Image (tube, rainbow, N blue to C red):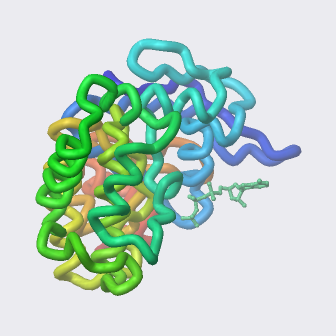
Amino acid sequence: MVLSCRGLRRDFGGFTAVNDVDLDVRHGEVHALIGPNGAGKTTVFNLLTKFLQPTSGRIELLGQDITRTEPAKVARMGLVRSFQISATFPHLTVLENVRVALQRPGGLAVQFWKPVSSLDRLNERAMELLETVGLEGARDRLAADLSYGRKRVLELATTLALEPKVLLLDEPMAGMGGEDIGTVAAIIRRAAERHAVLMVEHNLKVVADLCERVTVLQRGEILAAGDYATVSADPRVRTAYMGTDHG
Ligand SMILES: Nc1ncnc2c1ncn2[C@@H]1O[C@H](COP(=O)(O)OP(=O)(O)OP(=O)(O)O)[C@@H](O)[C@H]1O
């Protein structure tokens, strides 16, 4: 278990946005958090990354209680949410963007790079990351000149540069066409070999193809959890998530 929470709850005034949520994210797994609009997915992400303080409940990262830990420390411990670094620099090249991520002050890569601080090694690692995401041919292009889908892929590369233990992805395929979705799905699958992945995703085909485990939220509570086949066959899920129990 890399990341887990028990009894997670968050109230906003008199409104309970997240109620009694238990979640286990395991190494080597892609775990999807799904549910209708307003179900509480973003709030759960904000609680796990400590952007929001839980009203009650407990969160553990790599066996350590992080319920009261500051967000920056949680990120340094290896819980990285893609948008935290998703601001790529449009006027730097693709390779330069990844190098910047590898050299991030205070980032995980600082410790990672200490024994091998030579420029060559840095370039080598940056190229490895670009090969992982299939952007090696675009290394000298400005980030601003990339297509939307490839920009998102570059963001993923800069996230992976931080060597996260758990990668939190908020709708990584949003706004993408079929081909880009396939590319990003393949990257996430490969990334999951080294980093546990928790993702919010609305595209159920992506969830079915990519995710070992699915947790369904409804009105802040867990409606169902398990593998996709089990969860999608649950009549309550079909009614709540798809708005029908016939489809
Ligand atoms: N800061 C806040 N203050 C008050 N209510 C909030 C706050 N943040 C979220 N909520 C409420 O909590 C509920 C859950 O919202 P949340 O954004 O987590 O849902 P979601 O599942 O991510 O939805 P979507 O799929 O639309 O992004 C919603 O009813 C929302 O209005």
| Direction from residue 71 to residue 144 in the image, left or right | left
Place residue 58 in its image quadrant.
top right
Residue 19 visible in image: no
Taking 94 as reference, is 5 above or below it?
Answer: above
x and y percentages locating residue 25 in the rendered image = 34, 33
Taking 8 as reference, is 191 above or below it?
Answer: below
x and y percentages locating residue 172 in the rendered image = 37, 64
Place residue 118 in its image quadrant.
top left
Q: Please tell me in which quarter of the rendered image ligand 1 is found.
A: bottom right
Counting the numbered discs, the total is 0
Nearer to me, 18 or 53: 53
| Direction from residue 118 to residue 78 in the image, left or right | right
- Quadrant of the snapshot with the C terminus: bottom left
Residue appearing at x 45%, y 22% in the figure: 61
x and y percentages locating residue 168 in the rendered image = 42, 47
Q: Residue furthest right?
A: 13
Residue appearing at x 57%, y 56% in the figure: 39
Taking 114 as reference, is 228 above or below it?
Answer: below
| Direction from residue 140 to residue 109 in the image, left or right | right
| Direction from residue 205 to residue 2 in the image, left or right | right
Nearer to me, 114 or 32: 114
Residue 61 visible in image: yes
Residue appearing at x 38%, y 26% in the figure: 111
Nearer to me, 54 or 160: 160
Nearer to me, 16 or 173: 173
Residue appearing at x 53%, y 52% in the figure: 84
- Quadrant of the snapshot with the N terminus: top left
x and y percentages locating residue 169 in the rendered image = 40, 54
